Image (tube, rainbow, N blue to C red):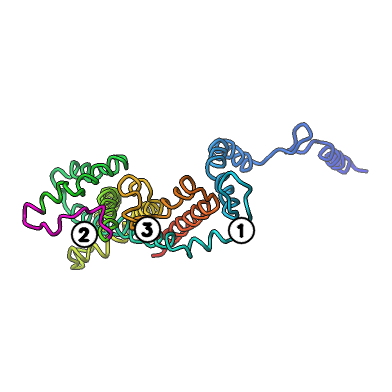
Amino acid sequence: MTVDAVSSNSAVVARASAPHPKARGGRPRLSRRTRQRLLGLAYAAPALALFTAIVLVPLVQSMVYSGYQWDGVSEPTFVGFDNYVNFFADPDLRDSLVHVLVLVVFFALLPSALGLVTAGLLGRERVAGDGAFRVILFLPQVLTSIVVAIVWGRVLGPDGPLNTVLRAVGLDVLAINWLGDFTWALPALGLIGSWTNFGLCLVLFLSGMGTIPKERYEAARLDGAGPLGEFRAVTLPGLRTHLTVALTLTITGALRTFDLVWNTTRGGPGSATTTPALMLYRFAFKDPQIGQASAIGIVTAVFCLLVALFLSRMAEQR
C-alpha cells in the first residue's frame, strides 16, 4: 500500500470518528434561522399569553355557551344553533341589526366621504392655521363617549340650544325632542357619530396625502387635469391604504356601538335605537340568557372580521 493511500484512509477514519460539526455534547445544534424564530417567539410569548387569556379563551367560551339555553344559574340545556337562528328570526334582534346598518352609513361612510373632500381641499394648498383646524376637528376623538353623550344629549334636548335656535328663526315645527322621537332618534345618534369620526378620517387622509409625491400632481396638471381630475387620478389611489384603515375602524366601531346609545337613549324610544351590542348587554345582565348573548357576540365578531377581510382585499386590488 502506498503512502498516499495510507494517508487517504487515515483522513477518512479521522473524519468518521470526529464529532459532527453541528453537534455539541451529543445534541444537534439548531440552525441560525431556527434560533432567530425561537428567540422571536420567546419575546412574543408574554403578549401571546395575555392575548390568549383575554381574547381567545373568552371567545371559545362564548362559542360553547352559544349552543346552550342558560340563565347563568340553573342547569344549561343544549339547543344547538337555535340561538343563532333566533338572532335573525326575533323581531327585536332583527331590528337591531337594521339599526346598526343605518349607523354604519353615519359612522363610517359619511365621515369618510366628508373627510376625503375636506382633505382634498386642504391638501392642495397650505392654509394658515390648518394645524389648529386639525386639532379642533380631531378633538371629538379625544373626548370620552360619556362626555360626548352628555353634551349632545343637552344640545338635542327639548329645551337645548338647537331647538332654541330653531324657535328663534320661526321653525317651531322642527323644535322636537330629537333623541326621544321615534323617527329622528336614530338619525340624531348617527349625526353624533359622524361628528365624532369625521376628525379621525380627516387626520388619516391628511397624513396620507403628505406621503403622495408632489411630482404626481405636477404630472396630472401637465396632462390637463383639473382639481377633480387630480383628486380622482392621484389623491384617491394614494389614499387607498388610509381609506381602508378609516373604513375598518369606523365600520367595526359602528357594529359594536354600545356606549353612545346607552348614555343617550338606552335603546329608546321603544326599540328605535337598539343595537346588537345593546341587546347583548340586556340578554347577559338584565334578562339573563347567556346563550343568546353569546350568540349575538359571536355574530357581531364574525361581521367585524368579514368587514376587515373584505376591506383589506379591496385595498390590495389596484
The quarter in which the N terminus is drawn is top right
Per the image, the residue denoted by label 2 is: 218
In the picture, measured across the screen, residue 109 lies left or right of residue 86, that is left
Dot label at residue 6: none
Q: Residues within 10 Å of mark 2 (few under 14, many from 20)?
A: few
Query: Judging from the image, what secondary structure is the residue with disc 3 in?
Result: helix
Position of residue 125 relative to residue 147, above or below, is: below
Q: Is residue 152 magenta?
A: no
Query: Judging from the image, what secondary structure is the residue with disc 1 in?
Result: loop
Per the image, the residue denoted by label 1 is: 79
Closest to the observer, 68 or 113: 68
In the picture, measured across the screen, residue 236 lies left or right of residue 48, that is left
Query: On the image, which quarter does residue 213 sit in?
Result: bottom left
Percent position (x, y) of residue 261? Answer: 34, 49
Image depth: mark 2 or mark 1 in front? 1
Mark 3–mark 1 distance (CA, rounded to whole Å): 27 Å
Mark 2–mark 1 distance (CA, rounded to whole Å): 64 Å
Type of the residue with mark 2: Glu
Type of the residue with mark 3: Val
Query: On the image, which quarter does residue 107 sit in?
Result: bottom left
Image depth: mark 2 or mark 3 in front? 3
Per the image, the residue denoted by label 3 is: 100
Query: Judging from the image, what secondary structure is the residue with disc 2 in?
Result: helix
User: Which residue does the image show at 53% across and 63% down from the upper left?
Assistant: 85
Q: Are marks 3 and 1 in contact (CB under 8 Å)?
A: no
Q: Residues within 10 Å of mark 1 (few under 14, many from 20)?
A: few
Residue lying at the far bottom in this picture: please name it: 224
Residue lying at the far top in this picture: please name it: 25
Closest to the observer, 267 or 136: 267
User: Which residue does the image show at 77% across and 31% down from the upper left?
Assistant: 25
Type of the residue with mark 1: Val
Q: Which residues are magenta?
A: 167-182
